[in-house]
Image (spheres, rainbow, N blue to C red):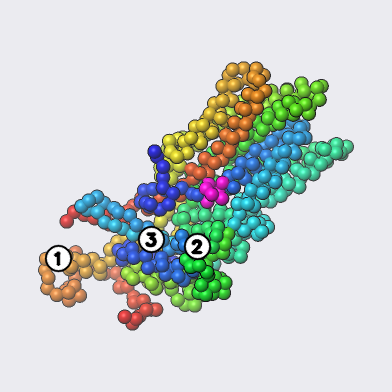
Amino acid sequence: MFAIPKYHESFLDTPVRQTQWAEGRGLLFIIAIFLGGVGSAAYILGVALDLKLVMIIGWILAVIGKGGFHLLFLGRPTRVWRALAKVRTSWLSRGLWGLGAFTVIGLAYIGLEVTESPNAGLRQSLAWLSVLTAGFVMLYEAFLLKKAVGIPVWNTWWMMALIPTFSLLAGSALVILIQLVLIELGRIAPDQQLAARSTIIVLESVTEILLIVGALVMSGYLARGLRRSGAVRISVQLLLQGSLRAWFWIGIVLFVIAVPALVGIAGGFGHLPTGLIATIAVLAVIGEFAVKYTLLASGSYPKMYPSRPLHRLPTQS
Amino acid sequence: MKRWGMVIDLERCIGCQTCTMTCKVQNSLPPGTFWARVLKQEIGTYPNARMVSLPVLCMHCEEPPCVPVCPTGASQKRDDGIVWIDYDKCIGCRYCMQSCPYEARSFHAELTSYFEEETPYEQVTRQVLGNGPQKGTVSKCNFCMDRVDAGMNPACVDSCLGKARIFGDLNDPESEVSQLLQNREHEVLHGEAGTKPSVSYLTEISPTMLNVLLAKFSDDDEGLPADKPPGERAVSAGPERSPDPVNQGAD
């Protein structure tokens, strides 16, 4: 099947896949950005819907999960403080500052909420600030990938829509899952279960909108790639018919888009048993990992040889 | 201010990989790491096929995409154009590797050796001179900047058997590299990326070499090419290649 070589088996017409952010320890990087996306999205939804446990889980995923896996990925994690230096030019440095800000502000806001602080003004200010920093954590990776000149398929504004859309989709699926688990475990008082189920219905509507947006954005990203040539086209072809096709068609199209869409057409979550809703939510979260994995794993360096031949072609004597 | 650059004459490169091995020795590079690669490919179709070689290294771009993306400032560009890595600052995030369209960088998760123990030469190279990578960092060609600062050529330039690599100051119009770029057809890799690489490739066969080949394959076998006047297809000769100042008289 269609696959491009990993190493320099041919430099004339063949792009080479990047592996540092996709294979081996590169998987740690993908896990980090996956957790950051899901966690920050869940945190934002937790603030919007006033769900304290969701906020806490989202903060843990984004800060400890994303931060921890980033540290595990680094070659020299003890020097990570040096990454604060180039905030003027480096999106990675900006991301670290943003994660740091979210860590502090998010924790402060959670503290105020858990202690039910009477200072409404401070709570509201911190709420907005924490949502902004969480949004930055969710979005900065799109800029980080767009600025990677060596991987042309990433250098597109479609990233700005692709990454936050699927992160929010997975975040809402995670919130649905958390609410279902709490209901099933009896951790939600009977007089509040109606509100909890209403939250699930609201999130279902959010999810349906997001999956339509996600399908459109993914289609745009793929269409742009197929219109181009070289490494961009090959990266997209890897997703559609190459070695990453299982991840794409099952992980993204089926888990994230098709299944929730079919549920919505069938009448929504209200008609489904709890276990099935939970399964669909888990699949959506797995699908978000598939999105991040396929985006990074399909990234390819352009072919080394320029369009105009550097060497003289042999001629018939 | 000098701006160091390199010109690679593809008609002279024979793909011997001497530059690759010299670079490895000079910088004590671990197994699997090649700062000076020579990519090879067969072009044409039988019976008119040939093997071509493309030496690839860090292009030391005038606008290097790897420098601004580095979060720690480990990737730096000197005033003379050499792009280098301060290994003491590198955290191994590998963002620079994704930013380089020339795949010029290598990451060292472990620092292995070709020998059971680090040799004294490797100890000196890595610890005393500061050349060569550290564990957990990214590395790349640095134009042998310690040799350049001492007035020498990079190791790959001096070791090239075919004298295919020419190193010099691109800001000096009288330098050999500048003269070659003015008088010979040349190309850069990934010019569309806007990186403005300081390494160029000479693609057109030189007039001197053309005359040599014409004489060699002509039906007239009178004397050596040097004894004959230029043939009918001889073009106006550009500046002759100046002898290598370092290895002059070495033979």
Quadrant holding the C terminus of chain B: bottom left
Task: Give the alpha-carbon distance from disc 2 to disc 1, as whole Å.
Answer: 45 Å
Q: Amino acid at mark 3?
A: Val
Is residue B80 something that shows in the picture? no
Measured as percent of width and height from the top left, residue B156 is found at 41, 69
Question: Numbered disc 1: what chain?
Answer: B
- Label 2 vs 3, first from the N-terminus: 3
Q: Tell which tag, 1 or 3, sits nearer the viewer.
A: 3
Q: Is residue B73 above or below residue A173?
A: below
Q: Residue at x 29, y 57 (%)?
A: B51
Q: Which residue is mark 3?
A: B38
Q: Which residues are magenta?
A: A20-27
Measured as percent of width and height from the top left, residue A311 is found at 30, 57
Q: Which residue is mark 2?
A: B140
- Sort mark 1 into few (<14), some (14-19) or many (20+) by Cα contacts within 10 Å: few
Whether tag 2 and tag 1 are in contact, CB under 8 A, the answer is no
Q: Amino acid at mark 2?
A: Lys
Is residue B7 something that shows in the picture? yes
- Label 2 vs 1, first from the N-terminus: 2
Q: Which residue is mark 1?
A: B218
Question: Numbered disc 3: what chain?
Answer: B
Quadrant of the image occupied by residue B211 = bottom left
Task: Give the alpha-carbon distance from disc 2 to disc 3, as whole Å.
Answer: 15 Å
Q: Is residue A24 magenta?
A: yes
